[in-house]
Amino acid sequence: MSKNIILTGDRPTGKLHLGHYVGSLRERVKIQESNNYDEMYIMIADAQALTDNADNPNKIRENIIEVALDYLSVGLNPDKVTIFIQSQVPELTELTFFYMNLVTVSRLERNPTVKSEIKLRDFNTSIPVGFMTYPISQAADITAFKANIVPVGEDQLPMIEQTREIVRSFNNTYKKEVLVEPKAVLPDNEVCLRLPGTDGKAKMSKSLGNCIYLSDKTEDVKKKVMSMYTDPDHIKIDDPGKIEGNCVFTYLDAFCTDEHFTKYLSEYKNLDELKAHYQKGGLGDVKIKKFLFNVIEEVLNPIRENRKMYENKIEEVYNILEEGCIKAKEKASTTLKEVKEAMRINYFEDKELIKSHIEKYKN
Ligand code: TRP
């Protein structure tokens, strides 16, 4: 039977937030707890982060520990998963270089996520080559581990598609089933695909200042929730309110359960009842925001406690990362060996090659 190997990761450009949590972190912990996998790798994608931060390596350097602390705090268990840093596994760079021959420039230019990132960053015509080609490096990340399952957010689907193409092209070109086609795993709850920012904008993003971070303090969470974007036309309590595009309800869709109602808002049985009342009119924003605050705090409290514990043992966190890098390197180098063999660039391993050349030049 084929193995279930999971690989995923995040760029260390900032602390992780609730969007990361519902979009992917929660899924990873669920898989970990299910024990229904053979190997799981979680990568801190510093090399990818550098593709548009070449001039700011300190930002990446400082955020590696933040992301590692976030991973451990949400419950990723280093005894069950390998957490590692991308740049410390040079095999990934080597694979990237070889895969580059299997991808056309126009294919890269069609990648919708890269396209929108280019717009967002105002690169115009000065796009770094490394940035343009990061989908290829992402294919290397995934295939180096022979991962078949990649739990990611929706914006990563084009990367997985491109990886699948590279895998097919490689196996076809070199006539050997060396690489494995991965499958993306998205959260089943649709609102979790893209959690909006607290200002109602499409996405949580550090530069927009609309994120709730996993490491935010209670007071900050309270402030952010109480000033969240709701329905701008819901002015008086008696006015009927809109649910669509109303952040508080989107977040409740992502986080709240019927038990939360029993605990914090027992006048309602569930979210449907709360929504109906809001739509009819007579339910104020402050009340729903206070409820959401309680729900989010229930999610964040255990994460905060774990974080505090790990913050007191930073050395141990560094050991976890270092051991993770060693393990990841081992796995990636096995794949690289197979890749080189398939590509016929294993000159010194192939004794037949030397023999045939001795034969060829015999006088
Ligand atoms: N592109 C991902 C992000 O922006 C990070 C990443 C790099 C990744 N390599 C990966 C995710 C491989 C999944 C698989 O967060």
Image (tube, helix red, strand yellow):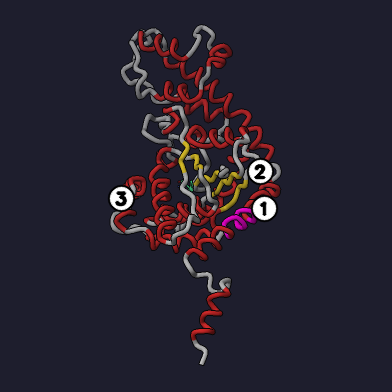
User: For the residue marked with disc 1, what is the amino acid?
Assistant: Glu
Q: Disc 2 beta carbon < 8 A from ligand 1?
A: no
Give the residue furthest to the bottom. Answer: 363
The local secondary structure at tag 3 comes to: helix
The CA distance from mark 1 to mark 2 is 10 Å
Which residue, given by chain and number where applicable, does mark 2 sit on?
A: 78
In the rendered structure, which segment of residues is drawn in magenta? 326-333
Q: Magenta segment: does it hold 332?
A: yes
The residue that appears at 57% across and 25% down in the rendered structure is 297
Comes first in the chain, label 1 or label 3: 3
The local secondary structure at tag 1 comes to: helix
The image position of residue 89, as x and y in percent, is 57, 58
Quadrant holding the N terminus: top right
How many numbered discs, if any?
3
Which residue, given by chain and number where applicable, does mark 1 sit on?
A: 323
User: For the residue marked with disc 2, what is the amino acid?
Assistant: Pro
